[in-house]
Image (cartoon, grey):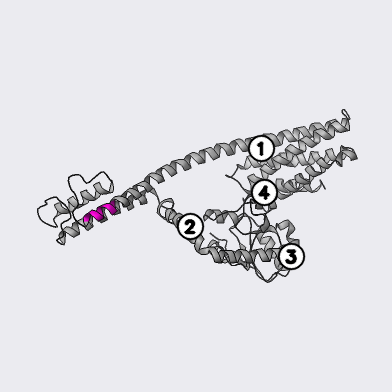
Amino acid sequence: MSRVVQKPFDIIDFAELVSRREDPDVAVVDVLPPATYRHGHLPGALNLPLASIEGAAEVLPDKRQEIILYCAGFTCTASEQAAVRLQGMGYENVREYAGGMADWLEHGGQVDSATGDAERSRGGREHGHNRSQAGAARRNHSGVGERSAWGDRLVDAMVLNRSIGQLLGGWLAIVFGFGLVYWLADLAGTPWMNANTPGRGSLADLGNAIYFSFVTALTIGYGDIAPLGPARVLAVVEGAAGLLAFGFIVSKLVSRRQEELMEDTHRIAFEQRLGRVRTSVHLVLSELQTIARMCAEGSVTAGRVRIRTESTLAVFEGELHTVHDLLYNPEQIPEEQDLESILASIAASLEVLNELLGCLPEEARDSTLMRQELRQIRARAVDICADCVPHQYTDDLAGWMDRVQDQAARLG
């Protein structure tokens, strides 16, 4: 899948990205926010968020280097915007992987997370040195990696990428193929079984061969027919092949059922998580409104208002983190009305929070804990933008995202 559009830079697909990213002179760049990058990114990718694109020289010092940008998916425009801006800054070889993370995952690509991978976002000379070392390591140890992955690729080709019907067809092909070999051997004058069948090469002889092949492939013994001479070796080989193929079928059936159970489990967990977030964000809004009213009326001391505000902001920041994951790394696509309700509550909460900050005494606003929480809330809220999320939302949802950003920018 690719978008057919005219752009002032090259668009590459999954296959080309796989081949180009092995080149140590190519920089693959994730332009999504740092939190999204830490959650998951292409192996070896650097992080240069769209909001920080002006500082590209720190991460990408060589303006002639081939740079491949990507974001969340085909509907995400962050990589396109980043490519245009980098070209305007003098970068000569900018390309875009338009499919982004969504296309990468759809093709079964592996994903790295922040664990053990923090060094990949560093820039300058250290970046170039690390990329060169990584390229050398891949060249030196590619044989080991290929050997270790050979078995996984074989299993994928024979089991995971095959339907139950295809696996059953393969098992039947083994049965009839070996049965035909036994029959042809008898037809050629090489007795292969102890049964006395009138008419060598007859249909009755072929029936015996197919029957014997079925019994052997099912590993239930030889029944009333036993192999003779070299046919014994063939019978052993067929027994092993039939057992393996039958095991693949059983494995596929079990895997299919497990996938269904996992999907049900994830769906229920997702619905519970979405409901909890919706409720928690609404409670944050209610609490901020109560605190703002208390502050305006002067019904409690400034110290108590500050403490209550700090605890509410801590909950608010945690829920913003969850909402960020729902937008950028969804386990499944939330319903539009659910997202609209959550975004509306966030926008209203930020609006009340700005009013509350104007009411709080200066010493309360200057507390270390509150300043830290406000910075985190602002960073999370600014990331909720209509241009970056990996889904195509209606104008109403885009409007709510813009409102969230506007209110977050006022936090300072």
- Reading the image, the residue beneath label 4 is 395
Image quadrant assignment for residue 304: top right
- Mark 3 vs mark 2, CA separation in Å: 37 Å
Frontmost of labels 4 and 3 is 3
Mark 1 or mark 4, which has the lower sequence index? 1
- Residue matched to label 1: 277
User: Of marks 2 and 4, which one's residue comes earlier in the chain?
Assistant: 2
Give x and y (percent) for residue 365. Answer: 86, 41
Query: Distance from label 2 to label 4 (Cα)?
Result: 46 Å
Mark 3 or mark 2, earlier in chain:
3
- Give the residue type at disc 4: Asp
Picture residue at 51% right of the left edge, 41% below the top: 263
Q: Name the residue carrying label 2.
A: 149
Asked whether the beta carbons under mark 4 and mark 3 sit within 8 Å of each other, the answer is no
Q: Disc 1 to disc 2, how far (Cα)?
A: 41 Å
32 relative to 187 in the view: left or right: right
Residue 265, percent across and down?
53, 38
| Three-letter code, disc 2 | Ala
Q: Which mark lies nearer to you, 2 or 4?
A: 2
Q: On residue 57, which mark appears?
A: 3
- Point out the frontmost of discs 1 and 2: 2
In magenta stretch: residue 65: no
- Viewer-nearest residue: 59 or 380: 59
Whole-Å distance between the Cαs marked 4 and 3?
A: 35 Å
Q: Quadrant of residue 312?
A: top right
Q: Which kind of residue does numbered mark 1 sit on? A: Val
* Residue 62 % position (x, y): 70, 69
